[in-house]
Amino acid sequence: MRSRDQEIKAALKALTDAARARVDAHPHGHLLRGHEPLSLTVQLPLDQDPDALDALAMRATEALNDGVEALLAHAAAFRPGRLLCLRCGTPECEHATTPHARQVFAGYGPSGLPRFVDFAALMVERRHDRIEHLFDGAAELLCLVMNEPELIADLLPAFHDKQRQYRVHTQLVAGFWRLPNESGRPEPLAVTIQIVSTEVVVRRQPPRRRFGVNIIGRGPDNEPLDHLHHRLRGIPWMLPVRWVQSALAEIEKQDSRRRVAETSLVKRLDGLVQSMARRLGRDERAKGRRTLHAEERHESGDRPTRDALADLAAAADDKIVFDTRRNTLVVLGDKGRAHVFNVDGKLVTSVRYPLATIAHRRETGLWRAAQAEEIAPLRALLA
């Protein structure tokens, strides 16, 4: 690389290091995951006048500080998978996420407390025109769009200022997907998919809105959605959500140049969420036309049950792990094969996991190394 390019690279690295140091020193710095971009605009004086360079350094430092503050203000309010609890003033409290896989967000209570209700009960209350399909076993997904006025209808005026800083503009509640738990048994699951914005205020600059898609829910057996993502090859709502997120990026860009009028914003966001509902329903109907066996193969690969004893015989002790949540033993074979046994040595199920999922479960402690006395019942099977 040419020396001038090296100089530019060194300058950019110094700027990046300075930004990272400010993030690390900030009390909310841990909220940034490291890949959020920081926008910084500088005007370089070409005459190299010392006074001009001093003024530039001061303006760049202020812009850097303001940019970091803006990023952290957004991150503190918008935590993926969690709501901002207006009563507690944080998305980290126990009220900020649903406790159950069947529940969806139904709006704020008077004191700013998020309310989560059973999806089927909400559909009955709203008299959804296809409510019977929730109970007749049909492979049909029901969707309901809920807009901001109804989500904050019960909110007392004292909490409205907090709500303006973190807005749930519109949301889609959808269910039931029937996704397999770790034993392979399908369980009903509903999710809340929201379009939210945070109001980022930094000194000497007009307020800026940041938009995003927030998905709130629980997986089968109430596991976190990120665990579900690692376990399955694909999340059924992911493609429509990515499409909405890309559209929001364009809206945010337009809004940063000139504030998008409220009436226009409401119309555009409602159109996005309505389109997402249609896409989700269409995708689920297409899946419903597959046979149950084909769907099982599609979600988790051909279940390698016939290889269970062969993999057990070939497995060293470090290939046998203990599932700390389910109190089961997992024998790891080749090509992602995983055989689940109960503590008595009975085969429960066999699945095929991506290697990244296996690594993730080990790293997070969901799977720990099995002890010799726990492995003994499995070795007895081979005898």
Image (cartoon, rainbow, N blue to C red):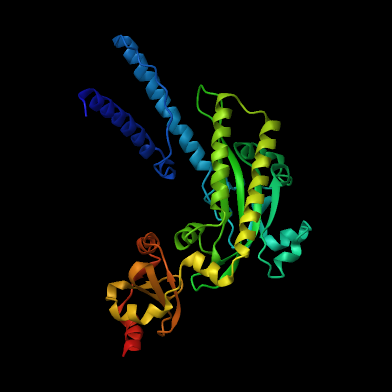
State the image quarter where residue 118 is shown.
Answer: bottom right
Q: Which residue is more in the foreground, 368 or 184?
A: 184
Q: Which residue is more in the foreground, 201 or 360?
A: 360
Q: Position of residue 40 (x, y in %)?
A: 42, 26
**Residue at horizontal 54%, vertical 36%?**
249
Instruction: Classify the position of the N terminus by image quarter.
Output: top left
Instruction: Note whether residue 109 is visible.
Output: no
- Locate residue 172 relative to residue 373 in the image: left or right: right
Q: Position of residue 108 (x, y in %)?
A: 67, 49
Q: Position of residue 42 (x, y in %)?
A: 40, 20
**Residue at horizontal 46%, vertical 63%?**
231
- Locate residue 300 relative to residue 378 in the image: left or right: right
**Residue at horizontal 43%, vertical 84%?**
346
Instruction: Note whether residue 246 is visible.
Output: yes
Q: Which residue is more in the foreground, 138 or 252?
A: 138
- Locate residue 313 relative to residue 346 in the image: left or right: left
Q: Above or below — where is 276 with respect to 364? A: above
